[in-house]
Amino acid sequence: MRRILWLVLLVAVAPAAARDKTENWVEVRSQHFVVATDSNEKQGRRIADQFERMRSVFHLRFPKLQIDPRSPIIVLAVKDDKDFRTLEPAAYLAKGQIKLGGLFLRAADKNYVLMRVDAEGDHPYAVVYHEYTHLLLGKSTEWLPLWLNEGLAEFYQNSEIREKEVLLGEPSGANLALLREHALLPLTTLFTVDQKSPYYHEENKGSIFYAESWGLTHYIQIKDYQEKAHRLADYAELLTHNVAPVEAATRAFGNLQHLQSELDRYVRQASFYSFKMTASTEDDDSAFKVQPLSPVQADALRADFLAYNERTTDARSLLDHVLQEDSNNVSAHETMGFLEFRQGHLDEAKKWYAQAVQLDSQSYLAQYYLAAMLVNDAQPSSDDQVESCLRRAIKLNPSFAPAFDALAVFLATHHRNLDEAHIMGLTAVSLDPANVRYRISTAHVLLVMEQGRSAVQVLQTAARLAKTPEEVQAVDNLLMNAQEYAAAQEAHAEQRKRSPDDQKASGVQVSGAETASDSSTPTLARRDTFVAKGPHRFLAGVLKNVHCNAPEMDLTVDSGGKSLVLHSENYYMIQFTALNFAPSGDLNPCKDIEGRPAKVEYDESADKAVPARVFSIELHK
């Protein structure tokens, strides 16, 4: 998966201006793919058929797996290297760079494949097939160990789709060379590597990890095929039932020391088997829907790809041309909105998305992004439109996870329909289990619902899936707060169970049916709905007047002779960080932050009588 994460973070360096000659583009829609090509209809049909047959291979290999992604797969098949270079990642335009035959670009709301029709080499679409494998295995990442996830992607990346058959399992010369030059990792290590492991991140160890993951997957796949066994399927089945990876491997593959020796001999042998599979589409290509694309439609599609590929200047140039030719082009308005949104120009983004909604109310993307813009609107009346847009986006595309996540967060923030907010969060997670942010959002909803222990469980799963340092930190911070909150809830519940005599003996005063400690019950106050005014703001100063009434917190920030009063309904949800120093011991925000310099992130209230709401506090030395 490392390839595409690297590809989509590139910066534009070369122009992709509007076409200087008329080109004939055609769109071919199969059951599961959309192919747009500047070659011809015959090539478009062939490519759509290839991808449908690749999908069929996965259906046969993994009959219990939900293999269809929730977001559409759009294939841009360009006829030659010249056209490919107008769209490929900018880093590959420099002299001396390798020539790509294709690439896979994944985003939350769509998936793009860029490929050359005339690509050469034994496996010109290796990157495409590798990332396509990850995409199809996306729903399994919660239980699928990293070695098998990467091993399967490496195994299928060398697939060769022929006219009437698919060749699978061709050996990887680069992986074999690496495995023969270096000692293999112990299998007990390989089976437990996760996203935080140096074997996954360090280049030299990471290469060994990828190569050995491929080698073991290749060995077991071919062995199972030859012996009509199902060890890999048995292993996967054990993992889905939460059996630990090493134990599952022992039960499915047998003695691991013996397997280690077999693998070492296997990667050093002189020849390797691969196998052929017939793979036909579920419907014949006469069912494909074909239509010509006008030059403006083709340019709008290319501009959208460039925008997602972060060639911003080229995308804008092409979009300007499209809008000159067709001022009502919905796709161009959406892409303009996306560009402005990504660059933080929220007012401009809102304008473009609002126009897209007016031009075509059936655009779920326009509805979703307009809602994202309106969340930062200073007018309280925009709340109803935010909710309306998100519900409309969900109705238009019930498979679009970001809209469910956004609605969950919106409802929780406004203390509205919390049971529904929880369902929305769970739906987003079910649609995209690998997305850590959706799990964090669901935990936030549970904290608002005062279900601390459930929030902890959600975040513990998220911690196992977190990949980037940012994801790890976000999960760890909220998990710490959720654990403290859950512990406070449980301690209070335990205290309430104690008899009045026990409470008196421990010094607690009893009055009637309740104890004096009830005043500090860690439950959320039901305040009037907070309405934010404008986007998040930041202020640096000294923290003063810190008072807690668990779980609420009030404090003041003194900055340059001015004071800002802040409030949090649940200080367990405030993200605390430290800049250039490490606090000693666990931080108790109610006691330890008084008088400290800090930078706070907060929202102003639309009602001047209501204190601002604090989100995060960065403590300074």
Image (tube, rainbow, N blue to C red):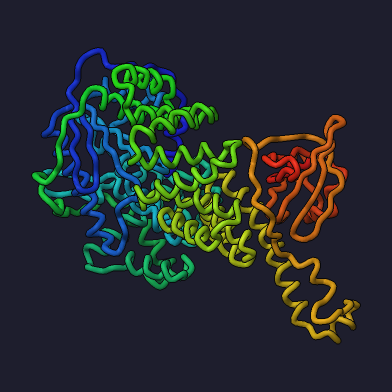
Residue 583 image position (x, y, % from top left): 79, 48
Q: In which quarter of the image is the N terminus?
A: top left
Q: Which residue is drawn at 42% across and 25% down?
A: 311
| Residue 63 figure quarter | bottom left
Judge by depth and name the residue closer to the eye, 459 or 104. 459
In the image as oriented, which residue stretches furthest toward the top? 20
256 w.r.t. 41: above or below: below
In the image as oriented, which residue stretches furthest toward the left? 286
Residue 501 image position (x, y, % from top left): 86, 86
Q: In this view, does 314 lie to the left or right of 453?
A: left
327 w.r.t. 366: above or below: above
Q: In which quarter of the image is the C terminus?
A: top right
Q: Is residue 257 left or right of residue 452?
A: left
Q: Residue at x 39, y 49 (%)?
A: 400
Report the number of numbered marks.
0
343 w.r.t. 162: above or below: above
575 w.r.t. 301: above or below: below
Q: Is residue 291 left or right of residue 127?
A: left
Q: Which residue is drawn at 34% across and 31% down?
A: 331
Residue 367 image position (x, y, % from top left): 42, 41
Residue 118 image position (x, y, % from top left): 20, 28
Can residue 271 be seen by looking at this rendering? no
Q: Residue at x 55, y 51 (%)?
A: 409
Can residue 1 be seen by looking at this rendering? yes
